Amino acid sequence: MAISMRSGYDRAIPVFNQYGPTMDDHRRSGETAKAMTEKLTALIELARKVKMTPTEQEKQRRSFAYGNTKIENDRITRSMVDELAEAKSARHRAPG
């Protein structure tokens, strides 16, 4: 966990970031855009090696479907996406 100090009115306020240093931290340290790009490339390579379970894939698929349909239609709910996914799964499993 990274801790950075942000200026308050009369005192510094610690800011905790569970993902590591913030962009402000990088700017203050003088880190270049090239170094950030190299770090991002390394993270992408690590992500490519992740093997998701079928359950994780289904959860991500539903989340993606919800997020994309919610943009177009504010009435969409997660339960609607789940119901449709279950119905599709049942049709897929049905013989014939």
Image (cartoon, grey):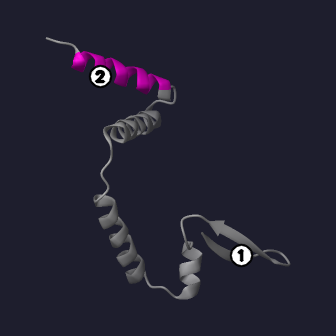
Identify residue for label 1.
Answer: 6
Examine the rendering and report whether any part of residue 76 can be seen.
no
Density class for disc 1 (Cα within 10 Å; few <14, some 14-19, many ≥20) is: few
Residue 31 image label? none
The percent coordinates of residue 49 (x first, y second) are 28, 59
Identify residue for label 2.
Answer: 89
Q: How many marks?
A: 2
Determine the residue positioned at 48% across, 24% down. Answer: 79
Q: Main secondary structure of the magenta part?
A: helix
Q: Is residue 17 above or below residue 90?
A: below
SS type, badge 1 = strand
The percent coordinates of residue 3 (x first, y second) are 65, 73
Determine the residue positioned at 66% across, 76% down. Answer: 4
Q: Is disc 1 in contact with disc 2, using a CB cutoff of under 8 Å?
A: no
Occupied quadrant, residue 59: top left
Left or right, 80 with respect to 18, comes to: left
Examine the rendering and report whether any part of residue 65 can be seen.
yes
Determine the residue positioned at 29% across, 22% down. Answer: 89
Occupied quadrant, residue 53: top left
SS type, badge 2 = helix
Occupied quadrant, residue 10: bottom right
Q: Residue furthest top?
A: 96
- The part of the chain drawn in magenta is 79-93
